[in-house]
Image (spheres, rainbow, N blue to C red):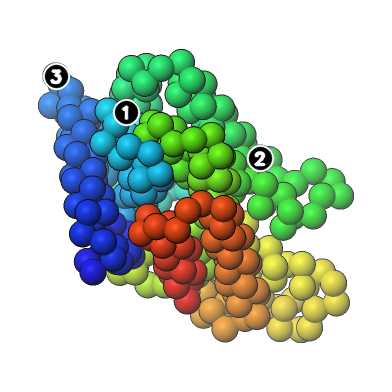
């Protein structure tokens, strides 16, 4: 039994382990090849986050989903490269929007080269992903385009905020289903589809990816508050400082608005203040880490992970299914 992929996923079969390791190594080579340019500076900027590492969660899901067909089919690795390039491109853009200084334990591209270079590098990665995608056929292009539309829509909805009368928590869950769930759903779908798995398996693995993607983002929300920079690879409380309404904060605000106690109201007032002040930011983090709203967000993470696991039920029992089930447990473990 060997740990592979993100979070130390345990693969209990040597053949599956070999397939996954070989596939991920090919994806890594594909990412480096796809981010090369005739202009050395573009190569440096485009490979900045590739070389910084990362969990490669989406390519891993592609590889595991491909086990329900032919995992060595020619479209499997390129489709994994496409989803990871798309994900990396969104990170360049997200860091500009969030004014982030650190990503994956290194300086963010915008901190190193400025916002313009970071945005254009993200665009470059999108272009390279599209180039690879074109060779995978019109259906793959359509699927990726629909997912990308959902991703961007989720980002816009987050920026716009909930409409009048809409529950902010429900709005937020819709946002992350688009921003995060859509591309992880495509990872499951591409892996199954490119391997030639039957339509039922493709549908199941798409639904699994969607639910797991939401759980994955909710775990990140918890980590933004509960972790240190070593665990998360970025500065703790980045979303908090930028006023991005993550689930623990939304639960806190709902609690305060529905007859919460003095502690809830005081913490909301603190969050509504100037969190660019380091002392106020540290105090907000300290108090959120022990507030019931954080535990409530953890429970939501567990719920979505359990739903993802239940979705796998109709698939035949095999080592790949067991690994996908374990991914649900490991996503929950990230959230504590």
Q: Nearer the viewer, residue 312 or 178?
A: 312
Q: Secondary structure at mark 1?
A: loop
Q: How much space separates mark 2 and mark 3, taking CA atoms? A: 37 Å
Is the C-beta separation of discs 2 and 3 under 8 Å? Answer: no
* Upstream in sequence: badge 1 or badge 3: 3
Mark 2 surroundings within 10 Å by alpha-carbon count, few (fewer than 14), some (14 through 19), many (20 or more): some
Q: Residue at x 49, y 20 (%)?
A: 139
Q: Residue at x 13, y 26 (%)?
A: 40
* Upstream in sequence: badge 2 or badge 3: 3
Q: Which residue is mark 1?
A: 75
Could you tell me residue 249's position as x and y percent? Answer: 64, 66
Q: Nearer the viewer, residue 38 or 240?
A: 38
Image: 286 above or below 75: below
Q: Decide if residue 306 is in sight here.
A: yes
Q: Residue at x 84, y 46 (%)?
A: 164
Q: Nearer the viewer, residue 182 or 249?
A: 182
Q: Which residue is mark 2?
A: 157
Q: Which residue is mark 3?
A: 38
Q: How much space separates mark 1 and mark 3, taking CA atoms? A: 26 Å
In the rendered image, the quadrant that contains the N terminus is bottom left
Q: Nearer the viewer, residue 99 or 333?
A: 333
Mark 3 surroundings within 10 Å by alpha-carbon count, few (fewer than 14), some (14 through 19), many (20 or more): few
Q: Decide if residue 43 is in sight here.
A: no
Q: Residue at x 48, y 28 (%)?
A: 144
Mark 1 surroundings within 10 Å by alpha-carbon count, few (fewer than 14), some (14 through 19), many (20 or more): many
Could you tell me residue 327's position as x and y percent? Answer: 42, 62
Name the disc covering residue 247, or none: none
Tell me: 25 left or right of 295: left
Tell me: 286 left or right of 235: right
Q: How much space separates mark 1 and mark 2, taking CA atoms? A: 33 Å
């Amino acid at each position: 039994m060997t740990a592979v992929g993100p979070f130390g996923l345990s693969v209990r079969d040597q053949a599956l382990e070999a397939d996954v390791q070989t596939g991920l190594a090919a994806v890594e080579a594909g990412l480096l090849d796809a981010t090369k340019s005739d202009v050395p500076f573009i190569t440096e900027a485009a490979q900045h986050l590739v070389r910084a590492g990362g969990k490669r969660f989406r390519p891993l899901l592609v590889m595991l989903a491909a086990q329900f067909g032919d995992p060595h089919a020619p479209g499997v690795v390129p489709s994994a490269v496409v989803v990871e390039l798309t994900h990396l491109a969104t990170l360049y853009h997200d860091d500009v929007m969030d004014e982030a200084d650190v990503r994956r334990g290194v300086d963010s591209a915008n901190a190193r080269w400025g916002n313009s270079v970071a945005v254009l590098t993200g665009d470059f990665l999108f272009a390279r992903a599209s180039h690879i995608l074109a060779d995978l056929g019109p259906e793959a292009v359509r699927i990726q385009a629909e997912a990308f539309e959902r991703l961007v829509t989720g980002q816009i909805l987050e920026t716009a905020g909930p409409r009048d009368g809409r529950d902010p928590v429900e709005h937020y869950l819709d946002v992350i289903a688009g921003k995060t769930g859509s591309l992880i759903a495509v990872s499951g779908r591409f892996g199954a589809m490119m391997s030639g798995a039957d339509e039922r398996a493709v549908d199941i693995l798409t639904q699994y990816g969607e639910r797991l993607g939401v759980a994955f983002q909710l775990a990140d929300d918890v980590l933004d508050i509960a972790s240190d920079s070593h665990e998360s690879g970025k500065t703790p409380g980045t979303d908090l400082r930028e006023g991005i309404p993550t689930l623990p904060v939304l639960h806190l605000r709902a609690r305060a608005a529905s007859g919460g106690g003095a502690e809830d109201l005081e913490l909301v007032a603190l969050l509504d203040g100037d969190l660019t002040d380091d002392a106020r930011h540290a105090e907000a983090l300290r108090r959120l880490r022990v507030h019931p709203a954080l535990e409530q967000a953890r429970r939501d993470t567990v719920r979505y992970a359990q739903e993802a696991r239940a979705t796998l039920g109709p698939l035949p029992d095999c080592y790949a299914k067991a690994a996908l089930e374990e991914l649900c447990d490991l996503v929950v473990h990230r959230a504590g």
